[in-house]
Image (cartoon, rainbow, N blue to C red):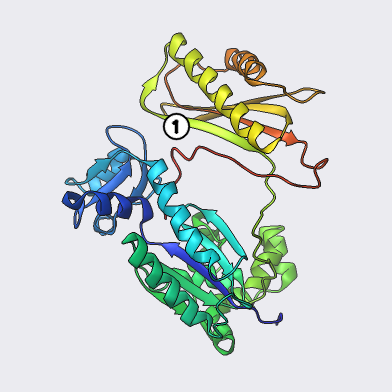
Amino acid sequence: MQSQRKIIHVDMDAFYASVEQLDNPGLRGKAIAVGGGHRGVVAAASYEARKFGVRSAMPSKTAKEKCPHLIFVKPRFQRYKEISNKIRNIFHEYTDLVEPLSLDEAYLDVTENKKGIESANDIAREIRKRIFEETGLTASAGISINKFLAKVASDINKPNGQKTIHPTKINEFLDNLPIEKFYGVGKVTANKMHTLHIFKGADLKAKTLEQLEGLFGKSGRYYYNVVRGIHNGEVKPNRIQKSVAVERTFWDDINEDDEIDEKLKSLSQELEERLGRKEIQGKTLTLKIKYKDFSLYTRSKTQDLYFENADKFYKTAKQLWELRPFDKAIRLLGLSLSNLNTEEKKQVSVQLKIPFMEFDD
């Protein structure tokens, strides 16, 4: 087993929905969904809504069928980001080794910490207490020797709880863990494993590396390692990103040329501003379109020289728009720039995205 570190995974409880209930007392104790509405998908659901089977990424129509009294609330991502920044400031009081995964979750390496607290379990408890006192929101945490185990553990005692997987208990814990609870095993993979009579960690561990690679390709080695408690990924405060993206999900579908033109100009300007702040340039522009029926279409253009400004983004985006295969109402437009100059900048890169329809756990 690898040298033992102290890793915490902190995950806010139903973050977007909880913020809405915090700011609007009239929503407390009620089944609410952030996003959705008369169309679209649920971005986050309160625990009251989850009792009825409402989940993030679920079509709003399905959510309403499962929970007829469901209340839909428009997302306010600027507010979520504001609170997220407060939470991250708390993290950094304990360690500089903080790796955010989204607005509402992060890994912390507290092997060496600023407070000199020996117990990672105590640190997690203190951080969760601080978050509640300073934001009014609850968080859950998982604590163990690596990121994989901490991530799995944080889901065990949700909401408003924490779970420590002690080094001496790792094998026992993983052997009894249902396969669908393994981080990195999605619904499709879990179903495939079930057909192979792999239901718990012990069943997975019984397979050889060769068998797993034959069944699951490159992922086979990952499954072979994590079921043995082996995961060597470090907590990386500055994760290297390879693209810069901006996108908009529309509350109402749009299909008018003037509207499309206006949105492409706005996205192009936003992309230029975000690139300029970090002095990042790129050679590949990608237009992303999501239609009313949720079908997704992307098309890219790569040029020899770096894109220069918003006007160039817009003109290229218009060309890509004209190449779209369908002329029907759309619910999302996005522009992203890749093939960046980060190699020339010694891998200094950052992804900047307008999170208009991120999904909350």
Q: Is residue 50 left or right of residue 349?
A: left
The location of residue 259, given as percent across then percent down, is 43, 14
Compared to 232, does 116 lie above or below?
below
Q: Is residue 303 left or right of residue 242?
A: right
Q: Which is nearer the eye, 82 or 292? A: 82
Q: Quadrant of residue 128?
A: bottom left
Q: Quadrant of residue 228?
A: bottom right
Give the residue pinned by disc 1: 294
Going 72% across and 28% down the picture, which residue do you hit?
A: 284
Q: Is residue 99 left or right of residue 22?
A: right
Q: Secondary structure at mark 1?
A: loop
Residue 327 is at least partly visible in this image: no
Going 60% across and 78% down the picture, which residue do you hit?
A: 6
Q: Residue furthest bottom?
A: 168
The location of residue 111, given as percent across then percent down, is 63, 78
Going 60% across and 73% down the picture, which residue do you hit?
A: 204
